[in-house]
Image (cartoon, grey):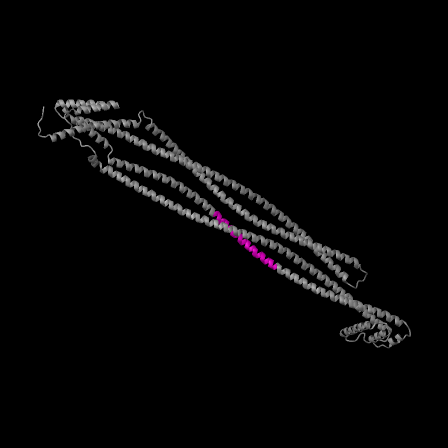
Amino acid sequence: MVGVLALMAVSFAGATAVSPIEKIVQMISDLQAKVLGEGTDAQKVYDEYAEWCEDRSTKLGFEIKTGKAEVAELKATIEEETSSIGALETKIEELSSDIQADEADLAAATKIREKEAADFAAEEKELTTVMNMLERATSILSKEMAKSGGAAMLQMKSATSLTDALSVMVSASVLSSADASRLTALVQTTDSDSDSAMGAPAAAVYEGKSGGIIGTLEGLTEKAEGQLDKARKEERTAAQNYEMLKQSLTDEVKFANSDMDKAKKNLAESQEGKATATGGLEVTSKDLAEDIETKSGLHQDCMNAAQEFELATKSRGEELNALATAKKVILEATGGAAEQSYGLNQVSFLQLSNGVAPQAVRFVRELARKSKSPALAQLASRMNSAIRLGAAAGGDPFAKVKGLITDMIATLEGEAEEDATQKAYCDKEMSEATAKHEDLTAESDKLSTKIDQDKASSAKLNEQVATLQNELAGMAKAKAEADKLRAEENAAFKKNSAEMKMGVNGVRKALQVLKEYYAQGDKSHESSGGAGAGIIGLLEVCESDFTKGLTEMTAEEETAASDYESYSKQDQIDRAAKEQDVKYKGKEAAGLDKAVAELSGDLATVTDELGAVNSGLDKLKEMCVAKAEPYAEKKARREAEIAGLKEAQQILEGEALIQKSTKHTLRGAKKHF
């Protein structure tokens, strides 16, 4: 019966080795570790996300800045092309109006010239016919006058006027009636002109002599010749003036058409440039708006993530505070209740005669043998001595035995606590040092990767900057060559055009002199009219060639100047764009270099910290790991010793309970021997 109760006591003690309070405390500790682990993981995830937010925001900021610059540039291009289009359209309208006016003037001048030429031809024909009639009449009259005594002579002498004389000549079949009518009309016109000019008749009445009629006819012939010469001179002058006007208007129309073609070509180019810039502006503006919207959304998302992380961190902190408070309250306030609810009440030992104490001594000795513990062997010896000495002295030896066991348990528990404290210290320091080592290693790898990335990006940007600078240098060289070529072309044009203008003016002056000279009728010597006409013709050819050369030269100069201006504008735009790229890329590369320098400093700091952590880890390993007896084995051995002593203690306490129960139940019974 005693053995059964002892086993029951031992079984109950083993079942309650870990009380519910201890289990709760352990669960709280595990939950605290879990929350801390989740917080560490969440911090790592948030740090990576925050870094991504920063990188993405920086990239979007650069894209937005570049997009705004491109939008401004495209708008400036559109405004410039719009202005050019307006100016070119106005120029085309003006040139079209000028061409229409010149063509109308040329058509009107041609019409006038044709009328003048027709009038001159009719007048020339009329005067030539009259001159022929006068010459024939004079010749016939002279022949008739030379005949003496003829009837025609007698009738002629009796004529009192030129009209009568002409009638006589018609009657004599010397002149036809049609010729006589024309001469009569001429005489009447002449008489009318003479009356108007002199105030008296000049040929209506003449002396009745043969010399008077012939003289009158000769005077009419000379006057007709003068009129014909005058008409021819006026015709030549009018023809020359018309040709000069025609040449001038034709040249103006030609130049205007050439200018219009250039203006239309430039207009098409400007319209194409504007359309291209407008399309580019639409795409760039759309991309810019998307980047701005993306950055705004990114900022909001990152802020939301930061707020969520902050709230989660705060919530974890509150949970940890609650767990720590609960743990503290449990540890501080439930010790007595747990002892009362789950511990064993101490009772007095049984009497030595029951044989329980020697059984406890034997249990401790067996425990000392199994655990090879000198301290337990010594305890068993002291327990045995205490029992014998106490029994001999007549006292209660169980209190001494109980004290010895309790003291040994306290000693072992103290040593266990010291070892556990050192183990906890070692575990804590090793864990923290290892975690810090891992964090620093990860940070070092991260910094190294970031430095390599930034260096690569900086090198790429510097390479792009060098390429752009080479392109700018090439553009500057090409621009200098273009400036030099334009200056040389312009200088050559000024020199050649001046010489050509001088030649044109000289030829025109020579033509004017020669034409005015050969147009004179009263020369005092026989001039070389045919040779002069040939010279004039050659001079006119030279004038045409010189004018044509000057026109072509001017057109080429205008084309070259326009091409140079277009090239200069495009070069300026391209150079500005490349310089802006150099500026942005150089600034970005400098920022990356600065970041590399800062990251290198951070890496050096992390490397130093990592070295210090490695040194600390080595010392902790030397202190906590390199032991003759591992802590786990030592802990297991000590726990076994403590458990054995407690079991021995429970054996004594169980027997004491049995003793008390027996005494209470059999109170008043007789003792049997």
Compared to 194, does 383 lie above or below?
Answer: above
Q: Quadrant of the N terminus?
A: top left
Query: How many dots with numbers?
Result: 0
Left or right: residue 668 compared with residue 281:
left
Compared to 364, does 218 lie above or below?
Answer: below
Location of residue 425 in the rendering, given as x and y in whole percent from the top left corner: 30, 32
| Range drawn in magenta | 65-94
- Residue 222 seen in the current view: no
The quadrant where residue 407 appears = top left
For the stretch drawn in magenta, the main secondary structure is: helix
- Residue 313 seen in the current view: yes
Of residues 342 and 207, the one nearer the viewer is 342
Residue visible at 39% across and 32% down in the picture: 611
The quadrant where residue 607 appears = top left
Location of residue 140 in the rendering, given as x and y in whole percent from the top left corner: 86, 70
Location of residue 523 in the rendering, given as x and y in whole percent from the top left corner: 79, 62
Q: Quadrant of the C terminus?
A: top left
Outermost residue toward the right? 149
The quadrant where residue 240 appears = bottom right
Compared to 236, does 431 lie above or below?
Answer: above
